Structure formats: structure tokens, C-alpha cells
Amino acid sequence: MQLRQHPLPSPTPGTQRELVSLHYGRPGEGQKVYIQASLHADELPGMLTAWHLRRHFDALEAAGRLRGEIVLVPMANPIGMSQWWLQSHLGRFEGLSGENFNRHYPEHIEAAARHAEPRLGADAAHNVAVLRAALRTEIQAGSADTELKALRKTLMLLACDADVVLDLHCDAQAMMHLYTETPCWPQCEPLAAYLGAAVTLLATDSGDNPFDEACSQVWWKWARHFGDRFPIPQATLSVTVELRGQQDVSHELAAKDAQAIVDFLIHRGVIAADGAVPPVPVPVGDARPLAGSMPIPSPVGGVLTFLREVGEEVKAGDVIAQVIDPITAQVTDLKSPVDGLLFARDTLRLVTAGARVAKVAGREATRTGKLLGAR
């Protein structure tokens, strides 16, 4: 394993942060896998899972079982790790700009396509290599005049040429679930089964360019751009893995999830099997449109109490929770707008008017426009 340090520009005199990446295997041999943990720095299950993955990868490399390159970033957000206010960790948004750490990754699709086009041909594998090189060149030339932009650029340079990208997150209180783009679903389906995901939410360009989509959407957009002139496969499977809830930080769960990821990589051929390849489990959940994932807002503020647990299937009109005004004693029912799976809910029990407190995954697409409000 090779440890690499990536210094970020200092935002103020006397301060300096760095990103650390761990590199296994040999670049250019076999598939490349990129895994990062806790881009939202206050989502900790991914960091513990990365610790277990590191133990696996150390042993697998020593045993000569790696058949590709693996890059592991065990803590993807040193900026967010430093953001605290009165013992509360604030790791989802950058304090300086207010921007979500998992949004607004720069897009270089058109520029890379323009520079790569003279070298494209009839061989799909050749086209993948040419486009990846062009994309890396464009990312490298991109602006990084703030610490946040430099972090985004560094993460993209580490991931842009990977065959598999796994972005480890979590929700507040939730079942294991995944987000991926619709063109990635055929490659993602075995991962969902190995992880035991309760649901996988699919979209094609959900808006605001989160990290996972920035890694995968280049391929279907290039395929659309070039049409029948050149074969362009979906060369990157990129998945946001939601490792349940923020409090689900235990060795038992992290070890289970790390083993599932290793089994998936054996299935992909990145890791040589020690005997039989672990069979793909019977899926626990299914794939549903992200446009059918319905947030449940509260129209009033007050004390929140849930009547239904995550993991329950609910019907449209079922009361999911109640908000109680302790002064007037008024009770406001919060109802599911659709039939679906209650897969996530908030941890706060004092809510403000307009707050979204839960998410139900329906089977039919009902929302349009930017879909990230349900993420």
C-alpha cells in the first residue's frame, strides 16, 4: 500500500489541511476501484467501514490477490472534519460558502469530448482510454482557487478514471439504500444484493452534479453526444452507498458492509477469489425511481414523534408521524403521499415549519426538476 498526501490550499494564514489517499495494486493493471468515506464529514459509518476495508486490502495485497488497482480515501473531507460549533459537528455544508460538500462538481464533458474526438475510433476500449485521459487533462486544468474547489478537484482526479466508484454516506435514521444513475443499474444490481440494500434509487442527472453522478454521467452523455459515430460504453459504475443512519457506527455493521464490498469486488474480478466466487445473494430490495422518493415535510413546528419505523411499507394517507404544539396542544398528522417504503427519517425531535422529516420510496415517478431535495 502506498499512502499519498494531497495538501489543500490554506484558506487563512497559519492553517493547512490535506487529503490522504491509500493506493493498492498497480495502476493500469485490471480495473480501477475508487472508494471514499464521509464526504459529508459528520456521516461516520463510512469511516469505520473504510477502516475494515483497509484491513482487507492490506491482507489481500500481501496475499497477491489484487487483480486491479484500488484507491481508498478513508476520510474524504478534512474541511468538514474541522467544523464544530459548541460540541456539534457540522460536516454537510462548508461554513465559508454554505455549499453542500456533495454538490457542484465541475463538468468538463464538452471540452473533453472536443479534445478526444480526433483520436476516437471503432474500438470501445480504446475510446474509453482516450476519453479518460482527456477528462483528466481538463480536470487538472480546472480552477482550484479556494480550499473547497481544491478538495473537489483532488477527489475528481483520484476517481475520474475508475471503473467503480463507491461514495460511502449515511442518512439520519435509515435502511441500507443506494443511489445510482439509471444507466448504471445493470452493473449496480449485484452490489445492491451483496449489501442487502432495501432500495436503490435511480435517476439520470438528478441535478446540482453530486460526486457520484459527476463520475458516471460523463459516459452516457458522451454516448449521446457522439451517437452512432463511436462506441462509448457506460465505463464507470458510480454509486452513493447510504450505510443506514448516523448512529449505526459499530464494528458488527462495518465489518459486514466491508465484507459485502469485498465480495462484490471479487464478483467483478478486481480481487482473485480464494476458492469459489461468493454467490450473488437474493436481493432484499428493488430499484425505484428517485423521482418517486417523496419527502414528508412538516407544515408546522413542534415536537415530532414517529408512529412508523424505517423499513415499513406504508400506504398513501398513512400517518407517519405527528407534530405536537406544546402550547396549544394541537396535533398535526404527517401522512405519506404515496404507497411505498419508509426508508429514512430524521433524528431531530423538535422540528421547524417546512422541515422534511422522512422519505418514502414509491414505485412511480411523480416529481420533476431537481431531485436532490430528497437526498
Image (cartoon, rainbow, N blue to C red):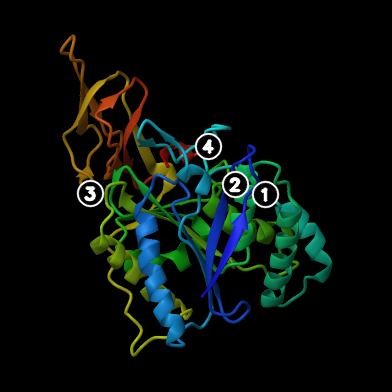
Residue 227: x and y in percent read: 71, 61
Q: Earlier in the sequence, mark 2 or mark 3?
A: 2
Q: Is residue 147 above or below residue 127?
A: above
Task: Report the Cα–Cα distance between label 2 and label 3.
Answer: 43 Å
- Which of these two is toward me, 328 or 125? 328
Q: What whole-number distance in Å separates the C-alpha atoms at marks 3 and 4?
A: 31 Å
Could you tell me the amino acid type at mark 1?
Answer: Glu
Label number found at residue 107: 1
Q: Mark 2 points at which residue?
A: 16
Determine the residue positioned at 68% across, 74% down.
124
Name the element at disc 2. Answer: loop
Q: Name the residue under label 3.
A: 311
- Give the Cα separation between the discs numbered 1 and 3: 36 Å
Amino acid on which disc 3 is placed: Gly
Give the spatial CA distance, label 4 vs label 2: 16 Å
Give SS at disc 1: loop
The crowd level at tag 3 (other Cα within 10 Å; few <14, some 14-19, many 20+) is some
